[in-house]
Amino acid sequence: MKPIDLETLIYLAGYFDGEGCVSAFKTKGITATVGSGDSETIGLFHEYFGGCISYPKPTRMTKRAITRWSIVGNPAQEFLIYVLPWLRAKRDVALWALGPTYRKSNSSLTDEEIMIRSRAALEIKKINQRVTVCQTPTSL
């Protein structure tokens, strides 16, 4: 990971807090994602934390080009550790996401790992459903 100055870190933490998403899965791990029309800021996430950048096609709702950054597993947890002190809206989700460990090997999970990951995934899903606002095309 590239060294990051405090001002940029705080900026990215705030941006993620407002525009980002944390998802968790029982076996695949966690994912931190930010999608935005501001490709320059999305590039900063990639530059400082790694991960992947994608360019999904515009939808009927967005009607504009979106750039998406995502990071998975242990690197996603490292990212969340860096931004955690400045998170407000995503703080609870980040704390749940930091509980399980995610390794790169394809070895099978222990019953305890499955239990911890399942609980974290369930709690993250509940929080995301509670705080996420979704507008349907008819409500626009």
Image (cartoon, rainbow, N blue to C red):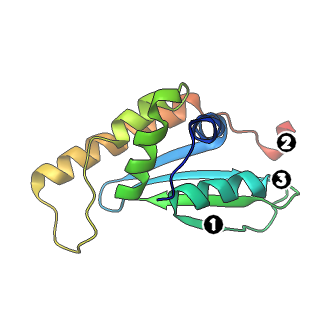
Helix, strand or loop for disc 2 = helix
Local crowd size for mark 2, using a 10 Å CA cut-off: few (<14), some (14–19), many (≥20): few
Instruction: Using the rendered view, name the quadrant where residue 5 is placed.
Output: top right
- Percent across and percent down for residue 69 are 61, 59
Image position of 3 (left or right of 66) = left
Local crowd size for mark 3, using a 10 Å CA cut-off: few (<14), some (14–19), many (≥20): few
Q: Amino acid at mark 1?
A: Ile
Name the residue tied to disc 2: 138
Question: Mark 1 near mark 2, Cβ–Cβ under 8 Å?
Answer: no
State the separation of the CA atoms marked 2 and 3: 13 Å
Nearer to us of marks 2 and 3 is 3
The first of marks 2 and 3 along the sequence is: 3
- Percent across and percent down for residue 8 are 63, 41
**Residue found at the very far top of the displayed protein:** 88
State the separation of the CA atoms marked 1 and 2: 30 Å
- Percent across and percent down for residue 12 are 62, 41
Name the residue tied to disc 3: 62
Label disc, if present, on residue 53 of the rendered structure: 1
